[in-house]
Image (cartoon, helix red, strand yellow):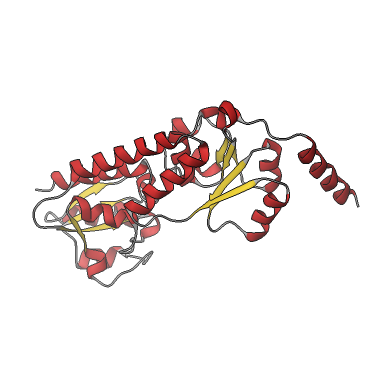
Amino acid sequence: MKALAAACLLLAGCAASPHERAGGGRPTIVSLNPCTDAILAEVADPEQILAVSHYSHDPRATSMPLAQARRFRATGGTVEEVLALDPDVVVGSSFMAPATRAAFERLGVQVETVGIASTVEASAAQVRQLAALAGHPARGEAVVGKIDAALAATRAEGEPVPAILWQPDGIVPGEDALVTALMRHVGFASQSAARGMGQADYLSLERLLADPPRVLLVAGSERGQRHPALDALPEMDRASLDPALLYCGGPTIVRAVERLAEIREGVS
């Protein structure tokens, strides 16, 4: 009964005091996804962003510079935490639990979901979606313009170079992953795909040593990924890639494609 009474009071409070919107009527937002965190940090006013996801405060999970992420409050994403911030809109992934989404909507909070972008075009559409939501469509176009410029400056010429991206936990990306598309763009050919490996397949050190790629991009820190045996492969170039560049689109594409192009240019 006490829980029911508390819920009624909460509902009554939401109904009695409509949201005061930041920036002349623009919505306040809580983001529950590190990919949307990074986009919103570029397209929304700082006062519009009431909180980002706790992932963006974690060096192992953020997709934006840590110093930038820590300018914003972080939330664990529970309904109670979010409601205490009283946002106009909650932005999360398309995998948000139906019960969580229903709870927000029942309490009058708009929910906007964003899926996983596997292409540059899909990512650009998400940037525009979130910029429009924040009330700053021109900022979305500016971000898309920066992505287009970075892609134009890093477009590959010549034969693709066989490469493997070795991600955290020793896995490889699939052919449909955004990072794989960016690798192709700068002139790498996925050797893991040529071996018949797919999304999140595990690549052992032994298998790698038996058939090394021309270039190995190491984005993890597992013991095998730092093994001294890798130093005994002079025909293989090895480079590190920040895991923060692997999973999200939006402004992350610019940093990812520039780093990949830098590695590609350095291949002897």
| The image quarter in which residue 235 lies | bottom left
State whether residue 4 is above or below residue 191.
above
Is residue 118 in view? yes
* Image coords of residue 5 (percent x, y): 88, 47
* Image coords of residue 39 (percent x, y): 44, 40
- In the orientation shown, which residue stands out farthest toward the right? 1
Using residue 192 as the reference point, say whether residue 171 is left or right of it.
right
State whether residue 228 is above or below residue 206.
above
Q: Residue placed at 19% from the left, 44% from the top?
A: 154
- In the orientation shown, which residue stands out farthest toward the bottom? 196
Q: Residue placed at 8% from the left, 54% from the top?
A: 158
* Image coords of residue 98 (percent x, y): 64, 60
| The image quarter in which residue 255 lies | top left
Q: Which of 2 and 105 is in front in this view?
A: 105
Q: Nearer the viewer, residue 261 or 131?
A: 131
Q: Residue placed at 40% from the left, 55% from the top?
A: 117
Q: Residue placed at 32% from the left, 65% from the top?
A: 204
